[in-house]
Amino acid sequence: MIGPQQGPSSQKDMSREPKDSVDAEIEAALDGINLQALGTDLPSSTAPAGPLKDRKSSPDANLKSGTVVGLSGPDVFIDLGPRMQGVISVSEFDKTPEVGMTFEFTLRGQEDGLWILSRREALELAAWNEVEVGSCVKARVTGVNTGGLELRIGPVAAFMPASQVSLHRAEDLSAFLNQSFLCQVLEIGPERKRVVLSRRAVLERERQQSRADAVDTLTVGALVRGKVTRVEKFGAFVEICPGVEGLVHVSNLSRKRVEDPTEFVKPGQDVEACVLDIKDGGQRIGLSMKALEDDPWDDVQGKYSEGALVEGRVVRILEFGAFMELEPGVDGLLHISAISRDRVSRLQDVVKIDETFTVRVLSVDIHSRRIALSKLDEHGAVLGSEDAADASAVRDLLDGTQKEPLGTNLGDLFKQALANKD
């Protein structure tokens, strides 16, 4: 089943994460960082061209509406209003504009009394002006600082706290330099100067969609292949497709007795499993590797008949008895009353974990998967003791199975057995 991942705080759903928690992360990441200063040292290919002395501090203020008043070679002349004229390259238009057409432009500086205009930046700004908190934007990483990443959304500088860069902790933020990716807007400050982004929110949403799509194809009993992501005392988590994990509980790792799951599976190992259950819309998926192994109980009826003597190993001791492994995947119960003719008050004083000895099968219940064992023979003598040996010799003599002379008569055997009991 899906466990707390992950560690797995890394697998939190951003949409469910408390807002004050995200705010605290942002404030910590922004400590000592001036968002307005981000991007001012960008290379010329990224930074706005021309003198900046006439540029307004807000991107919105740079957006101006103007009308085409003339064309001359590669230049298009624009009337921006009273005593404001500008020029722009014809290459910034999808097709050559006609006189009288009106467009929006951004101001990039002045030269010889004319404003240098940009149509592309205007389009970017117009789109940006419609963005709200929760919207998705494409941003490019332009810098790295101790708190996170510096980015650009077109002409707008933005910031991404380190905790919002990836689903898991990113050890080397510089690896993201110059990359562009889809981000979710977490915060837009007053006058749109403070812009905080999250890539993790987008990745979470994609993972949830991937989970939903994958879960729709899963059915109980289906065979799946996956990679072990981590191993805990209670079992192993297996990623069966991107963003979807299932839990192989320790009891479902193997038919063999599992004391330490790491002895059976390791992180990174490819495994095959059977889907046991799907709960909470795929948030909890139970898997079993044991179900793919041959069931040793299929052969128990023919191997362990009532009265048969078998060897077993003590694997667990409880107050009422000891469980003994007869073979991998097949245990029997040696009840405390079937260990000795004398009263046993503390089982640990009589048997020890991993001790191996012979026991007698009392009963076999295939349906309930139970085998009852006894350390006593049918006459109540402890198996392997002198009493049991004497009783066996008497039985062999009575049954006529003793071929060679015993060197004594039946009366002597009975006397010896009585003497041993005294």
Image (spheres, rainbow, N blue to C red):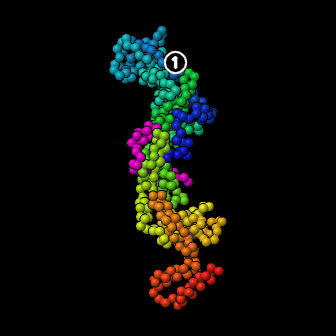
Image: 282 above or below 136: below
Residue closer to the observer: 21 or 346: 346
Give the vertical position of 324 relative to 14 (above or below). below
Write the residue at 33% across / 20% down: 95
Magenta includes 213? yes
**Circle 1 residue:** 61
Horizontal and vertical percent for residue 266?
Answer: 49, 56
Residue positioned most to the top: 82
Category of crowding for the residue at label 1, using alpha-carbon neighbours closer than 10 angstroms: few (below 14), some (14–19), many (at least 20): few
Q: Residue at x 58, y 31 (%)?
A: 19
Residue 229 visible in the displayed image = no
- Left or right placement of residue 232 versus residue 244 in this view: right
- Which is more toward the observer, 74 or 31? 31
The image quadrant that residue 195 belongs to is top right
Please say whether residue 406 is one of the residues in the magenta stretch.
no
Where residue 305 sits in the image (x, y, percent)? Answer: 45, 68
Element marked by disc 1: helix
Q: Quadrant of residue 298?
A: bottom left
Three-letter residue code for mark 1:
Ala
Res 378 visible: yes
x and y percentages locating residue 380 in the rendered image: 57, 73
Q: Identify the magenta region.
A: 207-236
Q: Exactly how many numbered labels are in the figure?
A: 1
Instruction: Classify the position of the C terminus by image quarter.
Output: bottom right
210 vs 103: above or below: below
In percent of the image, x 51 and y 40: which residue is there?
166
Which residue is depicted at the point 63% across and 66% down? Answer: 347
Q: Measured along the vertical axis of the image, is residue 380 above or below residue 224?
A: below
The image position of residue 287, as x and y in percent, is 46, 50
Question: In this image, 240 relative to 354: left or right?
Answer: left
Q: Is residue 241 left or right of residue 30?
A: left
